[in-house]
Amino acid sequence: MKKIISIISLLCMTHMLAMQQEKMDYLLQVAAEERAKIESPAFVYKSTSVYKCDYPGCNKSYSLEGSLEEHRLTHRPKNTPCDVCGKLFIHGDSVRQHKRLMHADIVKK
Ligand SMILES: [Zn+2]
Ligand SMILES: [Zn+2]
């Protein structure tokens, strides 16, 4: 009789452990699902980064269109030369800024 009781309690303990394990598995699964949701591109798209750079090999994304435009300039070849020293710049604004800084005496005010 004693032996049976100990077997039953052992079974109960095994059952309890199994239940706990199941619970843990479930919690781990939920956590993994939540993480997958956060890491999925769709979630990123919805939350902040809407404007994505389409340059090959670049996967930067920005929440503001202006930021993306600005970033995309870095992919453009520098092809605007300074007409004073010939240094190449990405766009006209950079040249103007450069001229104001480096050739202040030449640039008309
Ligand atoms: Zn880019
Ligand atoms: Zn220059």
Image (cartoon, rainbow, N blue to C red):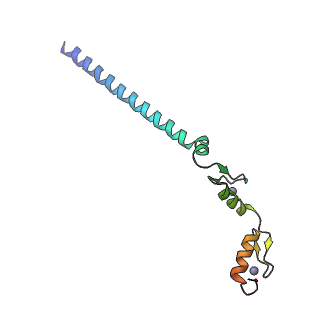
Quarter assignment of residue 84: bottom right
Q: Residue furthest left?
A: 2
Image height of 87 relative to 91, above or below: below
Image height of 72 relative to 104, above or below: above
Is residue 4 found left or right of 26 in the rendered image? left
In which quadrant will I find the C terminus? Answer: bottom right
Q: Name the residue rendered at 38%, 29% in the picture.
A: 21
Quarter assignment of residue 44: top right
Q: Name the residue rendered at 72%, 62% in the picture.
A: 73
Q: Position of residue 23 (x, y in %)?
A: 39, 29
Q: Residue furthest top?
A: 1
Is residue 51 found left or right of 92 in the rendered image? left
Q: Position of residue 52 (x, y in %)?
A: 67, 51
In which quadrant will I find the N terminus? Answer: top left
Q: Residue furthest bottom?
A: 105
Q: Nearer the viewer, residue 2 or 101?
A: 101
Quadrant of the rendered image holding ligand 1: bottom right
Is residue 52 found left or right of 23 in the rendered image? right
Q: Position of residue 35 (x, y in %)?
A: 51, 41
Count of numbered tags: 0
Is residue 24 found left or right of 73 in the rendered image? left
